[in-house]
Image (spheres, helix red, strand yellow):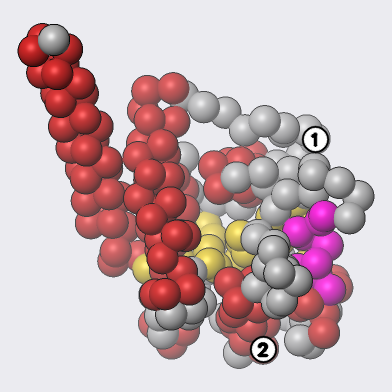
């Protein structure tokens, strides 16, 4: 029994250490590439907007979604980006399509359809990032998401040789976002394992659709 207790305790300690070190590594290695001020953004002309549901379980507008769309539209209007790749999930049902909802929201905010490309196979962050390079031909991008998510997205991008920075959308208050922030600690650990141990690949790839961007509007 003592041996079992020691073994379980050691396993728990090792897991906790892995989570802690993964988070420290990801945040510390990417923090200088995460921006809250658009004026400081490097000149990356294509944005990768990471998807999330447009509605909460209760049917209300998802603040994560709304603020990502507002940030993306603002960067476009200010001339900081010229094209947006909207990457998300549409596999659940015909009624759930993150990229489609993102496109509708951005058009309402004044972004022209011609400046938008949909990535319907962005099932998770790793898939979105890899497909951005391998399918859409982008090696220099601005990622748009909330701060908690941005470090992991940039970390994955850098692993794949993408010159990525992140422009963060504001987060809801801590009481609203606590569960999301907690999940992110474990998602960062999973990212390290995916990249360096499991060598996880995107679920879907497909034919290339290289985006060629002109800064002339």
* Label 1 element class: loop
Does the rendering let one see residue 32?
yes
Return the x and y of residue 65 as percentages of the image width and height: 64, 71
Prevalent SS, magenta region: helix
131 relative to 190 in the view: left or right: right
77 relative to 19 in the view: left or right: right
* N-terminal label among 2 and 1: 2
174 relative to 123 in the view: left or right: left
Return the x and y of residue 152 as percentages of the image width and height: 41, 52
Magenta span of residues: 96-104
Local packing at callout 1 (Cα closer than 10 Å; few below 14, some 14-19, many 20+) is: few
Q: Nearer the viewer, residue 188 or 78?
A: 188
Quadrant of the rendered image containing residue 85: bottom right
Return the x and y of residue 120 as percentages of the image width and height: 78, 49
Q: Is residue 3 magenta?
A: no
Q: Which residue is mark 1?
A: 207
């Amino acid at each position: 029994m003592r041996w079992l207790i020691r073994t379980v305790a050691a396993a728990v300690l090792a897991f906790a250490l892995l989570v802690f070190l993964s988070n420290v590594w990801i945040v510390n290695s990417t923090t200088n590439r995460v921006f809250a001020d658009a004026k400081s953004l490097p000149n990356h002309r294509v944005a990768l907007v990471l998807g999330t549901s447009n509605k909460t379980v209760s049917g209300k507008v998802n603040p994560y979604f709304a603020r990502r769309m507002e940030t993306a539209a603002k960067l476009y209007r200010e001339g900081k980006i010229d094209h947006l790749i909207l990457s998300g999930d549409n596999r659940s049902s015909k009624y759930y399509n993150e990229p489609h909802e993102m496109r509708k929201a951005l058009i309402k905010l004044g972004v022209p359809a011609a400046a938008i490309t949909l990535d319907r196979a962005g099932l998770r962050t790793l898939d979105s990032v890899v497909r951005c390079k391998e399918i859409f031909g982008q090696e220099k991008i601005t990622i748009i998401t909330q701060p908690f998510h941005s470090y992991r997205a940039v970390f994955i991008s850098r692993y794949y040789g993408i010159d990525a920075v992140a422009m963060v959308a504001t987060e809801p208050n801590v009481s609203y976002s606590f569960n999301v922030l907690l999940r992110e600690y474990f998602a960062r650990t999973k990212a390290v394992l995916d990249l360096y141990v499991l060598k996880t690949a995107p679920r879907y790839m497909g034919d290339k659709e290289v985006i060629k961007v002109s800064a002339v509007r």
